[in-house]
Image: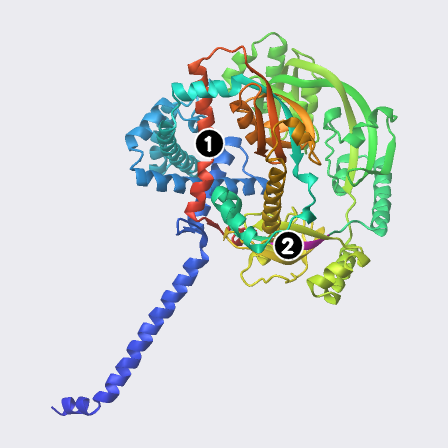
Amino acid sequence: MATLQKIRSRGTILILILGLALFAFIAEELVRALSSSRNASRQVIGEVYGENVNYQEYNELVDAYENAVKLNNGNQNLTEAQSIQIRDQVWNEYVGEKIIEHEAKALGLKVTDAELQSVINTGSSQILRQTPFVNQQGNFDVNSLNQFLTSYNEIMENAEYPAEQKEMVASYYKYWQFVEKQVRNEILAQKYQSLLMGCLRPNTVSAKAAFEAHNNETDILLAAIPYTSIKDSEVEVSDKELKAKYEEQKKQYPTRYDMPEEARDIKYILVTVTASEADKAALTEEMKEYATALEQGENLANIVREAHSSIAYNGVPMSRKALPADIASIVDSVAPGSIVGPTTSPDNTMNVVKYIAKVQQPDSVQYRTISVPGTDAQAVQRADSILTALNGGAVIDSIAKRYNQAAQEMWLTSAQIDGATLRDDDRRFVETALNTPVGSYRKLEVSGGNIIMKVSDRRNIIDKYDVAIIKRPIDFSEDTHNKVWNDLSEFIAANPTQADIEANAPQKGYTVMTNEYMTAGSHYVANVHGTTDALRWIFKEDTKIGAVSELYEAGNANDQLLVVMLTGIHKKGWRSLEDEELKQFISEEVIKDKKADMILAKIKDAKNLMDIAKVQGAVQDTISQITFSSPAFVMKTASTEPALSGAATGAKMGQFVNGIKGNGGIYSFVVIKKKPLDAQFDAKQENVQLSSVYMRSLNLLMPTLARKAKITDNRYKFYQ
């Protein structure tokens, strides 16, 4: 009871303590939730139909695609350009798949596992033909796939297989999962497309109309009054007229006015750092030392390597096509043993060349080998015995089989060895192959044993050149780079605003350039590599119009210096009349309309072409072979005129037609000839052509669907 009484007496304090503890718990969870939410938002790389695209999800697709490219090409290293291309392709395919899935779901379309398996079994998808599971004819082989899938389970579940083999098999399995998903998406897209094509199926009436549209020609005598006959200054345009035209054009040409993503305008200064005269002089002195070393030295390969030449020397003569163009142009005019250089070349390099000799060698050699491992006396004796037996008439296949070797025929080509870095064993192997007569055998001593080689064939004897080339880029020094950097930094510090930079740049030798309507999907600023940081600055939410960026180092070798100014922001969605470019375009359209009204008023009472010809600015011409399906081109107004084609096709022989409003002016004409071409109506052929036209028109659907999908692309924030 005493304890209960004590608790009651301190009840208020306990409630307060518990309340604070509870609040601390809730606050901790709230902070944790907010932190988690912020982390999740940082992983959002884009948006489609209002749904976030997670960076991890997208990057896994990129990894899968890169893996597919590497496996198909047999190349484990991708260039920057290849990686960017893959990221773009994955993004475009991802967005396209989401759009098709969205539309297909609304229509009740789906792909069953049975449909997918049917396509795989028949190999009817082109995607399947790009996989490693193909036969000799290049067609997809489902049996090869099934064998792989069976072996995959066996290998992955068996502890005896090495980790490297499991890793390789796992990469192929992941690749197949990627292909399978692609095929499923392809089937769904084909279903959706087939459904739409069913709504656009050509018929006899449309086929007949299409035939007549391109097989009935009309010739006309034309009188035109170009819009340019009236000066723009004679036309007044009000804001009300601009607004009305803007609303009209929005409905008629939505793709022109609806921006699917935000765009920004910039101005920038880009300075390329090049070698100074002092840099060139220093490199010249260095190259003179290498020239002396080549002239005196015996180990040319070491000298070329130590000189950091971009072209390796391996002691094996190279074909002319493998030589740099500037070197190839002089080798036939240089005496053996001569040293040429230092010389500069148009490719911004400095060269020193030692011309050793010109020889004639085969461009390709076919050979067979038997390896005899071991360096002891017994192994050497075994190699000698094999060589003796072969020279005595023994069959190489029989001897190779005795040593569990295939001795298969291989080709060695100039393309494989020209300029390659060769070890001593490799070089001796190549020299032996190139210099052994057809049908002869040679024993070649290499590290770890001997090789018995037979040359089976030699093809295309060509001139080859034994030349040691030291080719060095004429690079700028650190001092030169620092000077250019400091000069530009001082200029920016002295001119902190956009107006200051534009006004004073020419005096300092800098050029201010413009790039309008950049999107976040751009990978480079000013087409310069290594400008990701500048791109992020341009599209940061807090970068304001008129802001000047910091000075960025860019380029593949930090040889570009870049400063950027943000000059305009075009928000996602409908472009407004505040957009100067759009306002100019709308203004020109209104002026054209008002000029058309002015011209039409002048010719409204015209009865023939003579009346039109009396109007100031009128021109005359004869237009032949007009068809309904092909817009007429009027040379006198330099414009393509679909409206004129339609009017001419519909007019009767001898009829005078007045006041056709076109793109370049107002047209009046008289029909002087109408004739059908000597072609027979073929409904089947016309239907095929119409189907092709309808298919192309369906391609215009995707941009419309993409606008509805409300796509946001923020990938620039995640990739360097």
Please tell me how crowded label 1 is: few (under 14), some (14-19), or many (20+) other residues with Cα within 10 Å: few
Name the residue beneath numbered marker 1: 697
Q: Residue at x 66, y 12 (%)?
A: 440
Residue 217 picture location, percent across and down: 56, 18
- Residue 49 is inside the magenta segment: no
Q: Does residue 613 appear in the picture of this structure?
A: yes
Q: Which mark is residue 266?
A: 2
The local secondary structure at tag 2 comes to strand
Q: Where in the figure is residue 45, as x and y percent of width and height?
A: 46, 52
Q: Single out the residue that lies furthest toward the top.
A: 393
Instruction: Inspect the image, locate mark 2, and give the three-letter code of the amino acid beneath it.
Output: Ile
In the rendered view, tell whether residue 578 sits above or below residue 679.
Answer: below
The magenta segment = 265-270
Instruction: Please name whichever residue, 696 or 429, is drawn nearer the observer in this view of the structure.
Output: 696
Quarter of the picture containing the N terminus is bottom left
Q: Quadrant of residue 218?
A: top right
Image colouring: rainbow
Query: What amino acid is labelled 1 in the image?
Result: Ser
- Front residue of 660 and 250: 660
Q: Residue 337 vs residue 693: left or right? A: right
Q: Residue at x 35, y 72 (%)?
A: 28
Q: Nearer the viewer, mark 2 or mark 1?
A: 1
Whole-angstrom CA distance, mark 2 to mark 1, is: 35 Å
State the image quarter where residue 486 is shown.
bottom right
Q: Earlier in the sequence, mark 2 or mark 1?
A: 2
Q: Which one is in front, 184 or 704?
A: 704
* Location of residue 266 in the rendering, given as x and y in whole percent from the top left corner: 64, 54
Helix, strand or loop under label 1: helix
Magenta stretch, main secondary structure, is: strand
Instruction: Report crowding for label 2: few under 14, some 14 to 19, many 20 or more residues within 10 A (C-alpha).
Output: many
